[in-house]
Image (cartoon, grey):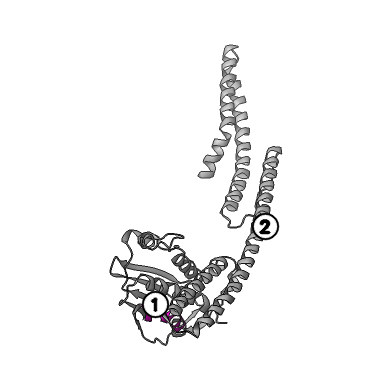
Amino acid sequence: MEIFIAYVKKQLGKISFYVFFSALFFFLFWVYQIPIHAAFYAVLIGGFLGIVVLIMQFFEFRKKFIQLDRVLKQKDFLMENIPKAKGILEEKYERVIVRLYEDIQNLENSYKEKEQDMLEYYTLWVHQIKTPIASMYLKIQSEDSEFSREIGMDLMRIEQYVEMVLCYLRLDSSEKDYIFREYSIDSILKQAIRRFAPQFIRKKINLEYETTNAVILTDEKWLLFVIEQLLSNALKYTKPGGSISLLWKPNQILVVKDTGMGIAEEDLPRIFEKGYTGYNGRQDKKASGIGLYLCKRICEKLGYGIYVESEIYKGTEIILDLKRRKLEVE
């Protein structure tokens, strides 16, 4: 029906033109007292031929309409899918489309080159900056003092921010960076716990965790990044003397629970948005609003779900649904 209505609107001028001249034809026959039935036959034959032509053109119009509609619904635009132009005006339009398509392709190629250059530069920068960080770690290991422990905490935060930069750059660069194998969830959790152990001790925060012996199909590097980000947030917003729990539940559900300040109800729908810091972020002027955004994006890449339940001043639960479609183990 949509195609028919569109066709009728397109041909409305021709139909109106035919009706007008048919009426004029009858009027002239009447003025000159020529038998009206002669005019009637002429108009009838002309109308019949016109209808035949309109029907033939309708099928051609319908075919082109469907082809163009299919092109619009395709994810990747290809010039060869556009119907062939008929008539000089359509050819002009086609040349305009080709010109615009070529300009867009050139812009995309230029953008990809700049993006690749940026990725290569920052990847090199990340690897270079890790050298002085490692050197500073070694220098403070020989000293056990309040000052060295403070420096160690700052270095760990710097290292974490550096990894966030690399993660942000690589997130959309290539799907080849994801390698799925079967891993022990305990092994991944213990790596994250060891990294943040000094903060747990320093802030006197209790950690509740029991060995699960569970095995999941995942990419270890990216899942570890997510868990470290969640632990980092939990430690940041949990006061000394509080507790953080890592709970493994049936159907491959991992819950990171804390007794921190919680998240305001109005902030909950937006906490995974890029750059959104909410009430807690406004209290902590250094918050970037990138950590949870990256967690959400990585979980989407890995095929996981990530959800949050929280109540202000009573704590937060971040729920990771680690079920995903069955993949071939490498």
As drawn, 15 above or below 155: above
Q: Nearer the viewer, residue 55 or 100?
A: 100
State the residue at coordinates (63%, 44%): 60
- Crowding at dot 1, Cα within 10 Å, few <14 / some 14-19 / many 20+, comes out as many
- Callouts 1 and 2 close, C-beta under 8 Å: no
Is the C terminus in the top left, top right, bottom left or bottom right quadrant? bottom right
Give SS at disc 1.
strand
State the residue at coordinates (69%, 46%): 99
State the residue at coordinates (58%, 53%): 70
Chain-order first, disc 1 or disc 2: 2
Q: Is residue 236 magenta?
A: no
As drawn, 289 above or below 190: above
Q: Nearer the viewer, residue 306 or 2?
A: 306
As drawn, 326 above or below 72: below
As drawn, 35 above or below 216: above
State the residue at coordinates (55%, 37%): 8
Q: Is 133 on the left or on the right of 274, as rendered?
A: right
Which amino acid type is shown beneath numbered disc 2?
Asn
Q: Is residue 197 magenta?
A: yes
Give SS at disc 2.
helix
- Identify the disc placed on residue 109: 2
Q: In the picture, residue 170 is in which quadrant?
A: bottom right
Q: Which residues are magenta?
A: 190-202
Give how far across and how far down residue 218 sits, in percent: 50, 78
- Crowding at dot 2, Cα within 10 Å, few <14 / some 14-19 / many 20+, comes out as few
- Identify the disc placed on residue 254: 1
Q: Main secondary structure of the magenta part?
A: helix
Distance from disc 1 to disc 2, alpha carbons, whole Å, reads: 41 Å
Q: Is residue 219 visible?
A: no
